[in-house]
Amino acid sequence: MLRKYLVEITILLVGAFTMMFEIVGSRIIGPYLGTSVYVWTSNIGVIFASLSLGYWLGGRLSVNRANYLYLGGMLVLAAFFVFITAIANVYILDRIIKYIPGFKLRTVISAIVLFAPASVFFGMVLPYGIKLKMQNMAHSGVTVGRIYALSTFGSIIGTFSAGYLLLPELGHTNVQLAISICLFLLAAIILLQAHKWIFSMIPSLLLMITALTMNYKHNKVKDFIDEDTQYNRVLIYNTTDKNTNRPIRMLRINNESSSAMFLDDDNDLVFEVLKYYRLVDYFVPGFEKTLMIGGSGYAYPKDYLQRHPHATIDVVEIDPGLTELAGRYFDLPDDPRLSIIHEDGRTFINRSNKTYDAIFMDAYKSMLTVPFQLTTIEAVQHLRNMLSDNGAVFANIISSLSEENNQFLRAEVATYQKVFPQVYLFAVQYPNPTDKEKGFFQNIMLVAMKSAQPFDFTSLDPELNDYLRHKVMLKGVDKSQILTDEYAPVEYYASKVLD
């Protein structure tokens, strides 16, 4: 009975494992190259190219050698390369980053080295399985249709189980090791069914090695946390702040330092840019209710609650896993003045009918890119509609001040200027840059005012006065660069910088 449906079971499982492997790919590369559209494009493109090569090779091999021994061998090799990816990806990516120039080339090379070998053998299984099940040409269409349907159904199972269950529960490394174990086990069963007793010992031995590697962690640093949530790969570890030499706990999401807190009983903000949200005291005095898009480690919301006991804040964070980690490792308080909404920022502002005195924007997709749906004129119009009459938007943007590589900043300023009567920029690191420093990337706080009331940019508060002195002018803003839901090439602008 098992032998009768063994090929169908194999096709179904390989379809599932292929999609699991593809989805896991972004988590592997994320901490080194981010999760931009270019990383996804490289991963998907390379895997599909490898599958295509596998289909061709499997078809050629099946012409004269259609037997279960070769099918088992394909599974053994697929399992082996998945296993290698699981345990050696850090070593491989470190060297690609070191020796391969150019961001786009790195993404392609990384995908080829890490995902192509296993994907080729995944691809070989499908045409080979069809040949094994082919009884006669009269029923070939039925056979091919059934096998392809099983493969596609397996892909659907693999996609949903990886994204909704396995990655958040097991983490990307253990998912890969589990795929390897299942493939080795399946190969052993196929070889035993084919009465290849000696050959079946090979996957059995490799199965034991892989099983012993479960729960493998590539980084043995004390207090190092490496977790996969539904949306992100998150790294948390203790280190030293390079600016103050004080101990901090760092949270990194994919390829960026996303949040941090001091560990020496000091509740001040580690990242200087977050302090510029305090300009709300200058631009919107007497505020009571605010909104923040992007929670991450909740560093600024904690500071806000401490400094403004009269005020409330709603935080929209798409990833509930980050909120859980912030509660466990970053002292996120259970405060009735803090309301957390787990939702995409754009969908929230599209549907919300609340009014806020200020809105803080701090959502990032990768190292330099804001999610495009939060950058467009349609999104900015929604933000304006949510503000009280004297309200303001405060948006953290990473850019340089050089016209050569600040295309996104200029486009975003043009977009805000189309909607708001007053838009100002405050350069956090280099407010009076030299020609060389203009090309350096830094945090820039964009402030957009709903009202047209004038400001003198001075304050009796020394801290606020210091921030206000960081006001800069931006050259080259062109209203034709306005970003829209139809056209917002945010990642394209970022890629030009990375290359």
Image (spheres, rainbow, N blue to C red):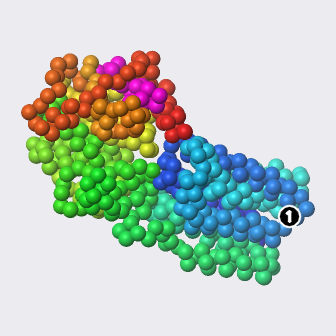
Location of residue 297 with respect to 181 vertically, above or below: above
In the rendered structure, the answer to whether residue 21 lies left or right of residue 363 reads right
* Vertical relation: 65 (above or below) 310: below
The reply to whether the magenta stretch includes residue 55 is no
Please report the residue visible at 42 percent of the width from the left and 61 percent of the height from the top. Answer: 227
> In the shown orientation, is residue 448 left or right of residue 109?
left
**What residue would you read off at disc 1?**
66
| Count of marks placed on residues | 1
- Residue type at numbered disc 1: Ala
Find residue 304 and report its horizontal and vertical position in percent.
Answer: 18, 45
Question: Magenta segment range?
Answer: 398-420
Question: What secondary structure is marked by label 1?
Answer: loop
- 409 in magenta: yes
In the picture, the quarter occupied by the N terminus is: bottom right
- Tell me the residue at 40%/25% (across/down): 410
State whether residue 135 appears in this view. yes
The quadrant in which residue 17 appears is bottom right
Q: Position of residue 375 (x, y in %)?
A: 40, 31
Give the camera-side residue of 402 and 333.
Answer: 402
One can see residue 491 in this view: no
Q: Nearer the viewer, residue 361 or 64?
A: 361
The relative height of residue 408 versus residue 57 in the rendered view (above or below) is above
Residue 298's x, y, as percent? 27, 50
Location of residue 477 (image quadrant)? top left
Q: Quadrant of the C terminus?
A: top right
Q: Residues within 10 Å of mark 1 (few under 14, many from 20)?
A: some
